[in-house]
Amino acid sequence: TFQHYFIQINLSSEMSAGGNNYQVNQTQQEVDEVMGIMQNNIQRVIDRDTKLTNINERADQLQSGASQFKTTGQQLRRKMWWQNMKFKLIIALIAIVILGVLIGVIVAQTKKKN
């Protein structure tokens, strides 16, 4: 791993003599800083992936809910259409019966007058 490699650099720098030791230490600090930034970036990518996964799952749930809502809405629309049609048929039947009674009464009265 990166960390193992950089530990080896650090150990070899301690074994180095005088002037090179400062440069190696400075380079090691820069490498450590870059490693910290890289680890932070990797963690951010992992967190972002987790959030995207959660968003995808919620989107799938919403899609499923929308499909179910659509199906239920269609079923309810059909049910209400049949209810409305039954109501119209009952009103039409009552109107026909009332007209039949009125026509029967009128016909009966005209026959009595003749």
Image (cartoon, rainbow, N blue to C red):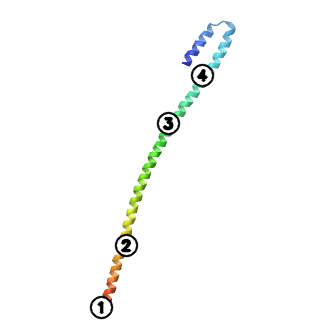
Residue holding disc 2: 92
Q: Earlier in the sequence, mark 3 or mark 1?
A: 3
Name the amino acid, label 4. Met
Residue holding disc 1: 112
Residue 101, how many percent across, how many down?
A: 33, 80
Residue holding disc 4: 35
Mark 1 secondary-structure assignment: helix
Dot 3: within a 10 Å radius of its alpha carbon, few (fewer than 14), some, or many (20 or more) residues?
A: few
Residue holding disc 3: 53
Q: Marks 1/2: CA distance?
A: 30 Å
Identify which residue is drawn at 35% across, 78% down. 98
Name the amino acid, label 3. Thr
Where does the C terminus fall, quadrant-wise? bottom left
Viewer-nearest residue: 103 or 43: 103
Viewer-nearest residue: 100 or 51: 100
Image-quadrant location for residue 4: top right
Q: Earlier in the sequence, mark 4 or mark 1?
A: 4
Q: Marks 4/1: CA distance?
A: 114 Å
Q: Marks 3/1: CA distance?
A: 88 Å
Does the CB distance between marks 4 and 2 fall below 8 Å?
A: no
Residue 102 drawn above or below residue 65: below
Image-quadrant location for residue 31: top right
Q: Nearer the viewer, mark 4 or mark 2?
A: 2
Q: Marks 4/2: CA distance?
A: 84 Å
Name the amino acid, label 1. Lys
Residue 76 drawn above or below residue 5: below
